[in-house]
Image: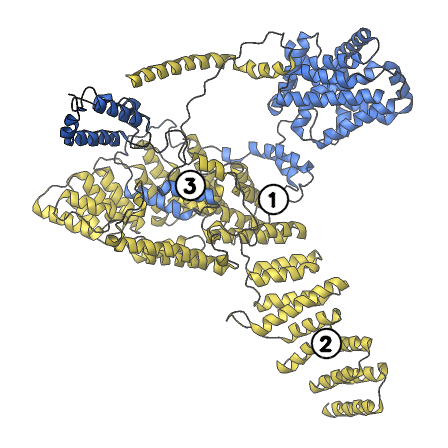
Amino acid sequence: MYRRLLININQVRNRLIHTHNTRLTLPSTKCKERESFAPVTWAPCTARPLGTSSISFSENKESSTSLSEDKGKTPEETELETEPVVKPEDRKQVETTKSGKESLLELLGAMKVEVTTVRKIRPSKTPRMSERPDQEPMESTHSMFQRAAAEGSQQHGTLNPALVAAVSAAASTLPNRHQAESELLKQLRKHEAIPDTQRRADIGHIISDMKVGKRPNGRSNVRPTSQIRFDDDGKGYTQDRGITSELDGVRRRKSPFTSKRLNLFAAAAEQDALSDLGPTLWDIDLVNQIVQATNQMPRNGFEEMIQWTKEGRLWQYPINNEAGLEEEASVPFHEHVFLEKHLDESFPQQGPVRHFMELVITGLAKNHHLTVQQKKEHIDWFRDYFRQKEDVLKEAEAYLN
Amino acid sequence: MASSCSQALRHHVCKSSRILRVHLQKAWPNRSFVLNSAADQQPAVSSPVEEIVIPKKKTWSKEAVLQALASTVNRDPTASDYRFQDDPYLTPKTSSEFKLFSLSQESGRNAAKYFISTYPKYFQKDYAQPHIPCLMPETLEAQIEEVSEAALIERIQMRKVKAAVDLYDQLQQAGTPVSLDVTNQLLDLICFYGDCDPAQENVPEQRNEETEDVQDEPQTKKGRASKASDKLKAAWKENNNAERIFALLSEPNTHSYSALIRGMVKYGAYSKAFSTYTDLLNNQLKADVSTFNALITAAPEVKEKYNEKWELIVDLLKQMAEQKVKPNLLTLNAVLKALRRCGTVGKSQAFPVISEMRALSIDPSLASYNHLLSIFYKPGAPFQGQTDILQEVMNEVSGKSFTPQDPDDAQFFITAVRICLDTKDIEQAYRVHELLGVGENWRLLGNDFQQNIYHARFFSLLCMMENIDVVLKWYRDLVPSVYYPSSNVMRDLLQVLDTDNRLDLIPQIWKDLKQLGHGNRQTLVEELLTLMAREKQNQEVQETFAECALDIKKMYDTGDRGKVMMSWTAGSLSDLVSVLLAAQRRQDAWEILKLFKTHNRVPSEELLDKFLTCIKESGDVNQALELVQISAGFCLPGTPKLIQRVQQEFLLSEQQKSMLSDLEIQTFNSD
């Protein structure tokens, strides 16, 4: 049963990660939890190993996931942490038996401590900030989550709302719901309140036992490339790179590129306006030489199309709704739409011809295939036509002018 | 009216969005935090009102969509170069085919262009709608006939040096004044082409020249010599048209001087260029940056000693500063290039020069780094204590994307990888290769020939430094899609196979070798045979070896489309026999053994001994006797030993015994 509970909490955790990513709202997950927790009943005396197994499970997952995900998860780690705290009686049992699992727990505790220190620091802005300034630039996502968490915890009496949600979910499975929940929360708060200095002492040795490529005191100079060493397939290509990349920082400071300058020029020397005539033959030749020297062969069909577009051989790929509007670009839209002005006195003011022409310009107004000039020509054609047939029309009394 | 209305509206929106943005930027630091916490918070907790950011209008270039699409395509290591994908028949398999196909494609294009331009009257139909100018014939004949400035401008634009000079003279004689700008353009033209008509552009000859350049390059490597040959072709002549027209100018300006000096430097009249520069100073004029660049290029030519050269350069730079001329990237590169010829002075001054340019916010291009590397690593010279420079340079450049700015940019990669090869620094070679993958840097690897040099160096370094798995990984990645290895590099690869004890891959490599056109390289094939014959492998491998060996034999027999035939040597034949014997293919081996006689080669005693052992396993007495006869036929000193072995190890009939004793007496007599 306990195991079910833990697994469920694990699931909640995973879902929470999910919510972090997709920004699903929390209440919906909570509902699901309730559903899944409903059949579970409380059985207080189940054995510890179950708990640790789930922890070790999460630990494995962690080591296999990428760094950034790792960081995304850390606020939720605390949730798992709550479990041992929830039941202090159990912990005593464990202390006597399992030392290996204890170290795992310690390890998790250490993970959490990282979080809590920051969490404490962020809102209160204690001077300790300056002790660990390196952490910030490197772990932007990390700190973002932590700030988010910190914000939440302030409003909820220094507790993460996600945690509270998990606790209430867990408590809802118990018979004495309200009491359980408040107890759980109390334990959690107590845990939060433990001074972080006390815990920081043991981070060092725990995490140094872990084979994770990140030092607890966060060396900002370690490049992300050195992480590749820990990839499974990192063989060969990045082999033996670690030492150099770490030394890079040291070397960079002594780089000859930062040696002293000749001091011939004043830095602010402004050039007189010289190039007045556009490119000279020499400039054209320079460009030509550069083109000759470099590889201009397209590597795929798209690059070939880019080349053709540049040469003007290919109609350019539309990048907005006005593609291919070159000749009409300067013509405002009303020239296209309001064509009445072309129906001047050369057409009769009323009658079937007028009516017909009004239909013609309505049609032309909606035609986007013709240019304004073509539309005018179209109207002009009708003007000539009706003028030629004037006699016939007058005879039929259709031409009223 | 409607348009003005919409304009007004747009203006308003712009203004308000700007205000909004200013407002937002103040609130920015909290913003990310607000958004993230919103996911955790209950909706009841008050969150700040969502503010709308109206993004700036972005103008896209017309290739933007295509560029985005192109960035999604990765190189396919199993495909050949894109330009050959139209016709699978023309997929090149060897480097010579690659050269042939790409050049013929290119020259086909040029031929078409030549015909269109030469006979424009047949190509007047304009099919394209809208009109495509670049598909229409270029006008190569001058249109304006009368003697006027417009005609002169036309001839200058068409780069007809002689015609332009003639027309200018006619104008002068007619007393028509020609404006200074046009005269300067004319001077540019004359100086650029060294007072000769340029070879017609886009004409097949031009291409031929280029291909010659490419073929020359192995000897010259840096292209310096090819430039030298340019200079030899057309030297600056005393009192040529440029000088004559220049002398006619009443008030030459900076541009006129610049044209003249650049022409002089281009065509090797270095000291004259400097005296023209003195002239310019005497006329109270200022030089422009390109003039200084040309003079800096010429500086190492007019002085002998290293420090004198350097002093002249410093002097020029000081004058630039005095005349308030801002140097550009080409200045920096010219100085560095000149420093390459200043020996030890170069080493001490290169970095200060770069710092100086940095201070003027001129970022070095790959050509600068190339010159820097060349200053510190002279080809063929020992490297002492300078191994760091490459590392420093790589620290500077790695991860950056460069755009071509200088014709020498394309030299960087092959220089860098040469140094890696010379210093056997695989780590830096990987960094160089990584840099090649960044952004558009691949364009800076240069033309096909340079690409080949680069990959050859990179791959030989890999063969030297890496284990077989890594080498093969790269081999499959590079060969044959971008690189066609030469036979030397393939020999390196065989050596790696040998050292890492992966001889079982030889048949595979042989297939590639055949495809790459190295199937008739005798030394290479012999090495292959030796490697296969040297050790006894397991049965399966021996079987594939035997197949491979027979394939090689076919290569000897038929040759490859009129290419050089290989001739059998005793070594290659005996290697072949031992490979076949090891695979228990006695019959095939027997055939090969006969070839010794037809090709007048002598088998070794050990080979025959081995053969006899093999025959003994099958118990074929007749063949054993024949073997002894062959051995006797070659008068080998080991024949009596063979006879002895046959007598001891085989069950012989009376007749056979007598035959053997006859042979024994024969050999004894011949001794």
Q: Chain A is drawn in which colour?
A: blue
Comparing B387 with A280, the one in front is: A280
Q: Which chain carries label 3?
A: A
Chain holding disc 2: B
To which residue does mark 1 refer? B427
Going by the image, does A15 lie left or right of B445? right
Q: Are marks 1 and 3 on the same chain?
A: no
Mark 2 / mark 1, whichever is N-terminal: 1
Kindly give the residue lying farthest to the front in the view shown: A396
Left-right relation of A39 to A281:
right
**Element at label 2:** helix
Q: Are marks 2 and 1 on the same chain?
A: yes
Residue type at numbered disc 1: Glu
Q: Label 2 sits on what residue type?
A: Gln
Where is residue B62 drawn, in percent x and y?
Answer: 39, 35
Callout 2 and callout 3 share a chain: no
Residue at mark 1: chain: B
Element under disc 1: helix
User: Which quadrant of the figure has residue A100?
Assistant: top right
Instruction: Tell me if residue B253 comes above or below residue A49 in the rendering.
Output: below
